[in-house]
Amino acid sequence: MPSQTRTFRIPLPLSQKSVNLSLREPTLTADNLGLKTWASSYLLSKRLPLLGLPTFPPTAKALELGAGTGLVGLAASAIFKIPILLTDLPDIVPNLQYNANTNSAPGATVSVSVMDWRDGVDEIVPEGEKYDLVLAADPLYSPEHPGLLVGMVGKWLKKGTHGRAVVEMPLRDGYSSERSDFRGRMERVGLEIKSEGVETGVDDWGAGGEVKCWWSVWGWNGDRGVGPAKALSDDVGLD
């Protein structure tokens, strides 16, 4: 399958250093949008160290839903130094595994697995198997996706003050009902926004061009929340 490799520079917290992640991206097809890295993924990867997330306990672990090329999850592994599981559909996982193999930092624990959001929605997961951090970027492409995504967040996000779900999605025309549905469903399962904002990036796939993206940090109702997140520049492209 024809492909190209692109390198993304991700800043690390509390230093002037950064990490470069080189991701293989096979030729885009209509059914496999996860084989490309979209603006919201790059924006979220750069924003992660600025979100003011709670200090994770030593046993913390993270999960990325719909990981695509793996940029967000690999960035989270480098930034937070906690084990992470990258998940997507069967057609996406081979390329995702390749990127995980070629970008895992020394000492980092990065795993890859198939996860179909339609499977096991009602399965009861023991609290010890859940994740302190759940990530998703550009996850809504159909009217059924808000319900499926929120089902996965509710299933896998650990309860308590440290549990956070971080989601970023483009403000695409025609998807306002999906975004509204997502927000309402998150609130109905007991989650609330701790911080949120809008930033601008550039997609160079499909129609391409500038795209505004909404990021949000969610925690369970009643915890103490987080401090205000720092702002990024409003113009970040996919270099």
Image (cartoon, rainbow, N blue to C red):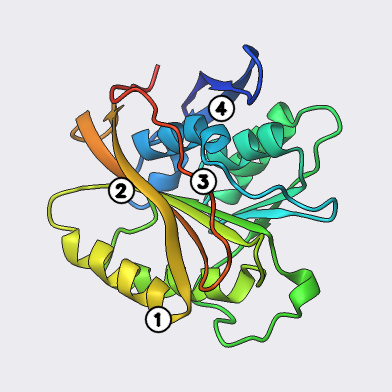
Q: Is residue 49 left or right of residue 138?
A: right
**Dot placed on the residue nearer the N-terminal end, 1 or 4:** 4
Residue visible at 62% across and 67% down in the picture: 157
The nearer-to-camera label among 3 and 1 is 3
The percent position of residue 12, horizontal first and vertical second, equals: 63, 23
Residue carrying label 2: 30
Q: What is the distance, in whole Å, between disc 3 and disc 1 at their CAs?
A: 24 Å
Q: What is the distance, in whole Å, between disc 2 and disc 1 at their CAs?
A: 33 Å
Q: What is the distance, in whole Å, between disc 4 and disc 2 at their CAs?
A: 20 Å
The percent position of residue 37, horizontal first and vertical second, equals: 43, 34
Q: What amino acid does circle 2 point to?
A: Ala
Describe the element under mark 3 as helix, strand or loop: loop
Residue carrying label 3: 227
Residue carrying label 1: 188
Q: What is the distance, in whole Å, between disc 4 and disc 3 at their CAs?
A: 32 Å
Describe the element under mark 1 as helix, strand or loop: helix
